[in-house]
Amino acid sequence: MAALKALLVLTFASVVAISFADPDLLQDVCVADLKSAVKVNGFACKDSANISADDFFFAGLAKPGPTNNTFGSLVTGANVQKIPGLNTLGVSLSRIDYAPGGINPPHTHPRATEIVFVLEGELDVGFITTANVLVAKTIKKGEVFVFPRGLVHFQKNNGKVAAAVIAGFNSQLPGTQSIAATLFAATPPVPDNVLTKAFQIGTKEVEKIKSRFAPKK
């Protein structure tokens, strides 16, 4: 009986694990038809007669991107929206560039674990567990750090020179939710009384923060 119960638990855990991964492909390739009106969990496939090498190619990570913005960082994604051939393959990349003092602010990826490889510079990185424990480290050129799926994490360049990483994900489209923007720039907006209660601040402070995230006209 104990062995049967253990087998059932293992089977259930395996089913859950599989259900939370990108779906496996059932053919050699399924190049995303990004213009298709068909709605599926992923993207509809192009006719195989119409695919080309360009569906599997992207040059956008070769050079640093501009970081002259509020956070001093830029994320350049190489996901299925940029590389249609990634559809159903369960992987993607990003390049993240950081100005001196730049930050990739606290955020989560609901559909993927992330692993970063430092191309240049030095970064303070970390993630927070569901027990509110910060796991943090300073990483340098050539080093790697992992951010578990769904956990809030960040990267901060505290150095005097620019930094950059290549990030890998086990999803064709990991999704990103920036914590501050999600709460203070949602449409329609999160009610002020929710934010004042959650953050233990006044309405004026909430409105001030919301104004900082308002789209620039």
Image (spheres, rainbow, N blue to C red):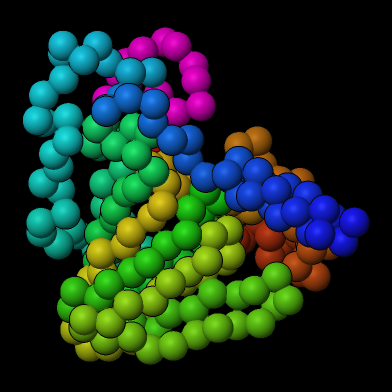
Q: Position of residue 33 (x, y in %)?
A: 30, 19
Q: Quadrant of residue 70?
A: bottom left
Up the image or down, 40 lies above or below 140; here it is above
Provide the major secondary structure of the magenta segment. Answer: loop
| Image-based side of 217 in relation to 184, left or right | left
Q: Is residue 56 visible?
A: yes
Query: Which residue is located at x 42 percent, y 46 percent?
Result: 171
Quadrant (top left, top right, bottom left, bottom right) of the C terminus: top left
Residue 185 seen anywhere in this rendered image of the structure? no
Q: Is residue 165 above or below residue 35?
A: below
What's the residue at 43%, 72% (across, down)?
146
Q: Residue furthest right?
A: 1
| Residue 145 figure quarter | bottom left
What residue span does the magenta drawing correspond to? 31-43
Along the line of sight, the residue nearer the viewer: 152 or 31: 31
Task: Examine the rendered structure and indicate whether residue 46 appears above or below residue 69.
Answer: above
How many numbered circles does the render carry? 0
Residue at 82% across / 53% down in the picture?
4
User: Is 187 on the left or on the right of 158, as rendered?
Assistant: right
**Residue 54: percent from left, percent from top:** 11, 31
In-front residue for pair 76/68: 76
**The N terminus sits in image quarter:** bottom right
179 is within the stretch colored magenta: no
Image x and y of residue 13, in percent:
69, 52
Q: Residue at x 42, y 10 (%)?
A: 37
Q: Is residue 37 magenta?
A: yes
Q: Nearest the camera: 184 or 146?
A: 146
Residue 114 coordinates in the image, percent (x, y): 42, 62
